[in-house]
Amino acid sequence: MRDSDTAAFKEITTAINGLLDAFLPVRAFVSGQVDTDSTNQAAQAKLSELQRMFLAYERLRPRLTAWLARLDPAKMGAGPYKLMLDEARVQAEHMMSEPEEILAAELRLSGGSAWTKLHGNVSSLITATVGGKELPITAIRNLAHNPDPAVRKEAHDAEVAAWKAHEVPLAAALNGVKGEASTLNRKRKWGDDLEPVLVRNRISPQVLAAMQAAVVASFPLWKRYFGAKARLLGKPKLDWWDLFAPVGKSEKVWTWDEGAAFVTQQLGTFSRSDATVAETAFRNRWIDAEPRKGKRGGAYCMPIGGGNSRILANFEESFDSVSTIAHELGHAYHNHCLREQPPLLRMYPMTLAETASIMNETIVVQAALKTLPAKEQLPILEADLQGAAQVVVDIHSRFLFERSVFEKRAGRELSAEEFCGLMLDAQKATYGDALATYHPYMWAVKPHYYGTDFYNFPYTFGLLFGLALYQKYVAEGEAFVAKYDDLLASVGIYPAAELAGRFGFDLESRSFWEGGLTVLGERVARFEALAK
């Protein structure tokens, strides 16, 4: 290491931060245009052009990483950039040669990124007919919340048939994405396809093992929940199309305006700053909420710079959708808390990405259970447990599925039928005999499979970590909020275990994760009592 390295490090980080400050808002705008209207050919072209422009930076990253890996954080006085240097040393151990890394970055535009775009474009244009009316696939999936079991089953059958009709290009896209990732992981000498994901998420294998052991041990708890819900629906077992069925005697329709008012009011009981971000998002129309043909499904939040955000959602007049908006506004609040950090220190792993969103969602759900009339509480609690069951049970099935896909894809391409078989195996391993039927095409439904390897377990991490933080808030009250804001602002500076340790949490202890599951267990018990 030379004396000139210190000056060079400062100059280079300043330049990269400036580049990202300029690039990220433009990318958010263009990708937002594509995601809300996949038929917008001009936006599609601009996104491709923008990706190629960014290649100039991507070509330099291997050389930059190798240089950063040689620097001593202590001698450099790296300060908050220490983690970046520590991670560069690990990345450098798993880099191909510089020409190979540059070629991989260039080929990604016509490889993995193109397959990801294909899935988004194909899936956003899929329609199906229910009740004699042709609807976009996002609207069809929303019918899973319909109170009429006949409508739910018809929508489910139509949805599965629609995915099957498009299974060839979607299977090709999944084969392409996972095949590219697996090939590069082997060339970079990773032990398996999960190892680089753990490094990117800043957790150890021990942390994942402890969390998943607690998750698997909780499956009998979720079987109780599914059984209680089945009894409420008058069935011996739930079918797949019943997982999101409403229960209880709720007469409340959550309009957009009512949901917005409720969310902002309840967030204000926790943090005035959090509520202000929500108010700004609603007032300034940061949220694209209506389902429509050509718009991608699901929901997400993306930063656009200056602590501001934009949110995509597919809103329906249910508390579940209100809770989803609160969740995405949590991401917006996280972006707000990071506003003073330079872009390089705003980059955090998926494991910590759900911290603020889970906090927001928990606050809103708890408020609903406390403030709404008794007759409304059962469906509210049910909506909350719906989401928790997805994050704990269903997401573990997605992890098992993706692990199997990587194991088999290392040898050859898989057919759509094989993807369906692996998905059914994973669902049966987690849901067990709590369900009478399953959904073989969930691999086609979830866009995350096509954009991020092993995207799944960080959501479980986020839920249980967020519940632990909520418990801390309940114990400490207003004094907790400043520490919480500091935690959100620091997610790009510390590894997950070190960040958690500042709150006295041991992420490699199974008991830590069981603490979060205990909260959910109490909710299941309350649900069973209300169900009677």
Image (cartoon, helix red, strand yellow):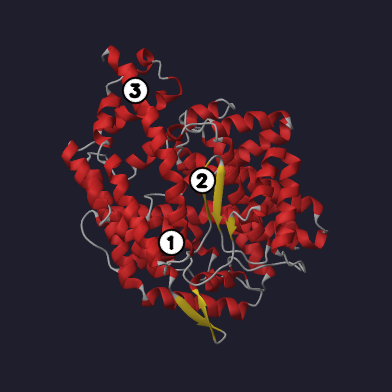
Mark 3 and mark 2: Cα distance apart in space = 26 Å
**Quadrant location of the C terminus in the rendered image:** bottom right
Q: Is residue 187 visible?
A: no
Residue kind at label 3, given as amino acid type:
Phe
Label 1: which secondary element: helix
**Quadrant location of the N terminus in the rendered image:** top left
Mark 2 and mark 1: Cα distance apart in space = 16 Å
Q: Is residue 215 left or right of residue 183?
A: right
Q: Which residue is mark 2?
A: 303
Residue nearer the viewer, 204 or 359: 359
Q: Is residue 59 visible?
A: yes
Q: Is residue 351 left or right of residue 114?
A: right
Q: Which residue is mark 3?
A: 9
Q: Which of the 4 image quadrants contains residue 230?
A: bottom right
Q: Which of the 4 image quadrants contains residue 380?
A: bottom right
Q: Is residue 388 left or right of residue 197?
A: right
Q: Which residue is mark 1?
A: 34
Q: Which sits earlier in the primary sequence, circle 1 or circle 3?
A: 3
